[in-house]
Amino acid sequence: MMTPASVFGLRLQQARSLAKWVAVVVPMAVVAGSLVALFLWSLDRATELRFSFPWLIFCMPVAGFAMVWAYGRFGKSAEGGNNLIVEQIHEPGGGVPLRMAPFILVTTVLTHLVGGSAGREGTAVQLGGSLASAFGKLFKLTPADTRILLMAGIAAGFGAVFGTPIAGAVFALEVLTIGRMQYEALLPSLLAAVVADWTCHAWGIGHVHYAISYLGGPGEGAGFHLDPLLMIKVVIAGVAFGVAAHLFAEFSHAASSVYKAILPYAPLRPVLASVILIGLTYALGTREYLGLGVWSPNPGDVTILSFFRPDHIDYWSWAWKGLFTIVTLSAGFKGGEVTPLFFIGAALGSALAGILGAPPDLMAGLGFVAVFAGATNTPLACMIMGIELFGATHSVYIAVACFVAYLFSGHSSIYLSQRIGVPKSAAANDIPPGTAVRHARDIRGAGLGDLIGSRRLRPINAPDKHTEGPAP
């Protein structure tokens, strides 16, 4: 029976716990947000230099060799990247090394300087995760509390790098296990994401603004909108987004295995990738698929922003960006897949808009978040991200696209250490609960997802550990 004394004692205990997390999380998030600000500033300067000095692309083989050699010689367990952080949350062990932060920051900026097609989420998450592990040791936290702090570190990095703190907090809870949310770190993760994002802005770092103009006129964005025919098109697009996410993850893992089979000496893999990327760049006659792809000083270049123009339809950029990114990250260049996935999704949405006769900017926005949802199995976080980025006018379409993409991406993921808590369909009940994706791929032997039933391209060897999925 609850007594006033027991109720008061429980609330006092909760207040002490909250005070402890505020004392630990706030300074960690401030440092994480500051490092993310430095990272984003450095990334912009590197991109400007790449555009100003086109010859830097020919430094790609040397840069790739140097970074993979340095990771192998000095990085040690830091090479595990995002997967190491996820593994440490599931099964605490040696912790996440602090050296991961400078290694991933410098090598990601170097990757973008020479033109590698990579992202930035992996870098931000690893900055947050390595700092969280260091703060856990500093404050002598228990393994259980360190686990929560690592989740808060993920939230801090994600929320700050994209300017979406709520999505960052939910992503940290959702990304660990497919089909199961872990709420024990809810408040610390939200606190970390908000503080890190605020800190990043306090340093004067802004984020690219994306806007969907469909139903964006005066009075049009108010209230609930649902067009049955457009909803059918959104569902069809969601299926395509899910399949694209699955293909990206599977071909990335397969490419890593091919690189390993061809070149056992790891530093030579990015050298081969550089030759391929330089060859593709000159064969296509464009540099649009190098780097982040968020902006370009050349008005005619295809960028993520260009897909949001209502008059812009592009049918093949999604495939080219996917190829450039897979070649880059699977070879060992550093960064992440998420911003390239935004590009792929927005470009695929643009293509589907032309095929289905749907609003291009709306479909680009849906693809932007839905392909990411399928590739990471985080539909709730991506739905929230869509609302934070584009507003709530199209929240129903955003939710449908993310959930359908999640379902049709199958049990694949760019994070091989992600675990399966609840299978996506009854057909996958042979996967034991708690199985990591890297092991589920061997158990299932599925191709375009368990719902589609095609055979997948099996890897030649066991996959490497990666930074943001396929990138080691």
Image: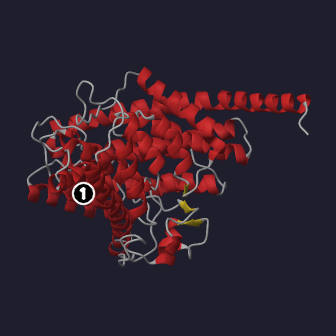
Residue 219 picture quarter? top left
- From the top left corner, tell me how far across and down residue 282 is, in percent: 10, 56
- From the top left corner, tell me how far across and down residue 323 is, in percent: 24, 60
**Front in this rendered view, residue 440 or 51:** 440
The answer to whether any part of residue 472 appears in the image is no
- From the top left corner, tell me how far across and down residue 161 is, in percent: 41, 36
Sort mark 1 into few (<14), some (14-19) or many (20+) by Cα contacts within 10 Å: many
Quadrant housing the C terminus: bottom left
The residue at 30%/52% (across/down) is 234
Q: Amino acid at mark 1?
A: Phe
**Front in this rendered view, residue 184 or 330:** 184
Q: Residue furthest front?
A: 228
The residue at 33%/65% (across/down) is 247
Q: Is residue 244 above or below residue 13?
A: below
- From the top left corner, tell me how far across and down residue 47 is, in percent: 25, 38
**Front in this rendered view, residue 255 or 217:** 217
Q: How is the image coloured?
A: secondary structure
Element type at mark 1 = helix
Residue matched to label 1: 324
Q: Is residue 27 above or below residue 283?
A: above
**Front in this rendered view, residue 129 or 264:** 129
Q: Is residue 190 left or right of residue 350?
A: right
Quadrant housing the N terminus: top right
Q: Is residue 417 left or right of residue 250?
A: right
The answer to whether any part of residue 432 appears in the image is yes
Number of numbered discs present?
Answer: 1
The residue at 48%/25% (across/down) is 199
Residue 348 picture quarter? bottom left
